[in-house]
Amino acid sequence: MDLETRLRVTSDLICTCVRNAAYYHSGWKGPRELINDKSDFWVNLNGNCLDISILAWCSLYGDRNAEFKWQKLINNEADFLSRLYATMDSTEVEFAQYIERMRLYRDKCVAHRDSYLVGDPKIIYPSLEEAVKSASFLYRELVDVYPEMEEIYAYKELESFYANRLKMGLKHYKESISTET
């Protein structure tokens, strides 16, 4: 696979993770209350955003055999991980535990439903804050290392992209509530 294709697909996965996390977060009034939980449509839409964000993130960080895992584009793994842990304000062990939580949710609820039958059937919904932070970190690293990234994507960083998508999601949820009869 050529470098431009690998960068494009990896960047698409990163943006998919961040965009869907923003839309997922925009659907909540509080820690346990959706903005519009009276409609099955909005509940399912919100859940689908969670699922897609986790699935994209796992393609980058959570699957050792994934075609678009971060290691395929980053040469100095030790240096990358050191900076990632510092950015995440986590240790290697904590980040590994986060990967396992994301993989467990993905395997039980999204990609490998047969895993639901193994072990504890309880579903643990992982936080997406760490996914957004680590995906944004990877994106910045790619922009810094590969000049081609400027031609592939207009974004220099994803924090404003996330904020923009969060604002857009909130607007649409608000509109949906005001148009209900």
Image (cartoon, rainbow, N blue to C red):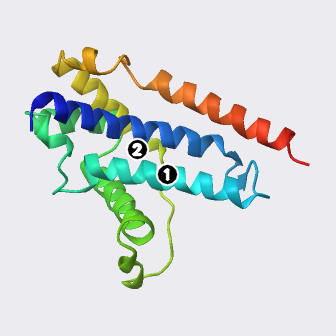
On the image, the x and y values in percent for residue 82 come to 20, 36
Q: Amino acid at mark 2?
A: Ala
Count residues near mark 1 (Cα–Cα under 10 Å), then give few for <14, some for 14-19, many for 20+: some
List the residue tagged with mark 2. Answer: 131
Instruction: Give the spatial CA distance, label 2 vs label 1.
Output: 8 Å
Q: Where residue 84 sits in the image (x, y, percent)?
A: 27, 36
Q: Image height check: is 45 above or below 13?
A: below
In this rendering, position of residue 89 left or right of residue 76: right
Q: Are marks 2 and 1 in contact (CB under 8 Å)?
A: yes
Q: Residue at x 46, y 25 (%)?
A: 159
Query: Is residue 88 at least partly visible in the picture?
Result: no
Q: Looking at the figure, which quarter contains the N terminus?
A: top left
User: Relative to 5, is 156 on the left or the right?
Assistant: right
Q: Amino acid at mark 1?
A: Ser
Q: Which residue is mark 1?
A: 127
Determine the image quadrant of residue 26: top right
- Residue ID at (57%, 46%): 24
Up-down relation of residue 10 to residue 140 (above or below): below
